[in-house]
Image: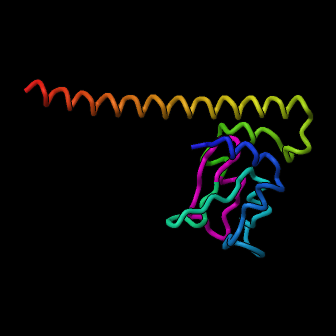
Amino acid sequence: MTTMEDYFMHLTEKRLASFHNWPYQEGCSCTPDKMAEAGFFHCPTEQEPDAVKCFVCGKELDGWEPDDDPWKEHKSHSPSCPFLNYDKPVEKLPVEDFLHLTVAIQKIYATKTYDNMVKEAKESGAETRKEMEKLAK
């Protein structure tokens, strides 16, 4: 899930700094520089040491290969990501475009938060229903 901390990854420099122990360096298509430029920051887990997330759409990807192109992978797995509409780093966007991107991030975050809350409420309701049915028997 996208978190408020992810918002601070709008700067390419900040995303780049997240790539500690990234396995793909020189001679690869998915170097830290290219990953950060494509909107990704590194969010490794024990199971997925090469996991990354887009700072805008929140799409998480892992299982990278040395010849994977970050932009192509981003477009392939999250074609509606608003970040993909721009051909320059966020730092070079005109103010109006930056504001549009910021609003898009807010909408995506709010939608994902809402969807998770609905899912949790449904799961909780299903558990409560089961308990009530047990009591009714």
Way the structure is coloured: rainbow
| Residue lying at the far front of the rendered structure | 135
**Where residue 55 appears, x then y in whole percent?**
70, 46
Question: Vertically, is 24 above or below 58?
Answer: below
Side of 85 relative to 58 (left or right): right
Q: How many marks?
A: 0
The magenta-colored residue range is 53-73
Percent x, y of residue 135: 13, 28
Q: Residue at x 55, y 63 (%)?
A: 45
Tell whether 31 sits left or right of 53. Answer: right
Who is closer to the viewer here, 8 or 87? 8
Q: Quadrant of residue 127?
A: top left
In magenta stretch: residue 64: yes
Furthest-top residue in this view: 136
| Residue 63 as seen in the image, left or right of residue 92 | left
Main secondary-structure element of the magenta-colored stretch: loop
Q: Residue at x 52, y 67 (%)?
A: 46
- At horizontal 74% and vertical 50% (from top left) the residue drawn is 39
- Quadrant housing residue 31: bottom right
Q: Is residue 77 above or below residue 105?
A: below
Q: Nearest the camera: 82 or 19?
A: 19
Q: Quadrant of the C terminus?
A: top left
Look at the image and tell me in which quarter the N terminus lies.
top right
Residue 116 image offset from top left, x and y in percent: 49, 34
Residue 97: in magenta span: no
**Which x, y percent locates residue 108?**
64, 33
Residue found at x 80% / y 62%:
33
